[in-house]
């Protein structure tokens, strides 16, 4: 359980940065070089490499060296834990709101109901 929590923390920490989200958004269109990921960002190539390393460490991105170019691609399975966590929370919130709605409907006198 601790490893899963640590992985989830890393994923959310990676997603908390707007530049990394921009890189992930670009990678949804297909693989890209680190240089291509750097183009729209106002930062050095070295900073982009560090961001890519964070994304790779938490499993959101996979990289490989092709000749002299480092290519990046999105790793869809990397989002699974975050998606599951969000889905579980959403389900719990919806259940609570449904119960609250039922309680409020039961508490409202019939003549006041629409």
Image (cartoon, helix red, strand yellow):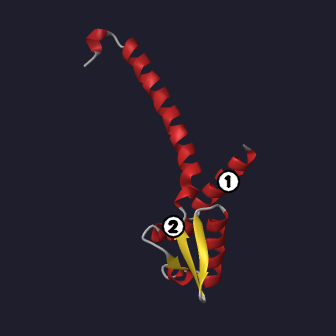
Position of 50 with respect to 98 (left or right) is right
Q: Which residue is mark 2?
A: 24
Question: Mark 2 falls on what kind of element?
Answer: helix
The quarter in which the N terminus is drawn is: top right
Picture coordinates of residue 19, whole percent (x, y): 55, 70
Above/below status of 107 relative to 47:
above
Residue occupying image coordinates x 67% and y 57% = 10
Q: What number of labels is visible?
A: 2
Judged from this view, the residue extending furthest toward the right is 2
Work out whether residue 16 can be spotted: no
- Whether 100 is drawn above or below 23: the answer is above
Q: Nearer the viewer, residue 18 or 79?
A: 79
Q: Residue at x 46, y 22 (%)?
A: 99
Left or right of residue 16: residue 90: left
Q: Is residue 71 visible?
A: yes
Q: Outermost residue, front direction?
A: 67
| Rendered-image quadrant of the C terminus | top left
Q: Which residue is mark 1?
A: 7
Instruction: Residue 12 in the image: state x and y as whole percent.
Output: 61, 55
Q: Is residue 75 above or below residue 67?
A: above
The local secondary structure at tag 1 comes to: helix
Query: Alpha-carbon neighbours of circle 1 within 10 Å: few (<14), some, or many (≥20)?
Result: some
**Distance of mark 1 from mark 2, alpha carbons?**
18 Å
Q: How dense is the environment of label 2, judged by Cα within 10 Å: few (below 14), some, or many (20 and up)?
A: many
- Ranked by sequence position, the earlier of labels 1 and 2 is 1
Q: Where in the figure is residue 48, as x and y percent of width and height?
A: 60, 77
Tell me which residue sits at (28%, 16%) in the image: 113
Question: Which residue sits at x=56%, y=79%?
Answer: 71
77 sits left or right of 105 in the view: right
């Amino acid at each position: 359980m601790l490893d899963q929590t640590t992985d989830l923390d890393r994923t959310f920490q990676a997603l908390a940065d707007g530049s990394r989200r921009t890189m992930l958004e670009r990678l949804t269109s297909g693989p890209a070089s680190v240089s291509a990921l750097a183009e729209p960002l106002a930062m050095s190539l070295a900073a982009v490499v560090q961001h890519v390393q964070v994304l790779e460490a938490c499993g959101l991105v996979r990289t490989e060296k092709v000749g002299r170019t480092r290519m990046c691609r999105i790793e869809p399975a990397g989002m699974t834990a975050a998606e599951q966590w969000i889905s579980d929370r959403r389900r719990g919130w919806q259940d609570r709101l449904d119960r609250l709605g039922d309680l409020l409907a039961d508490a409202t006198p019939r003549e006041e109901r629409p």
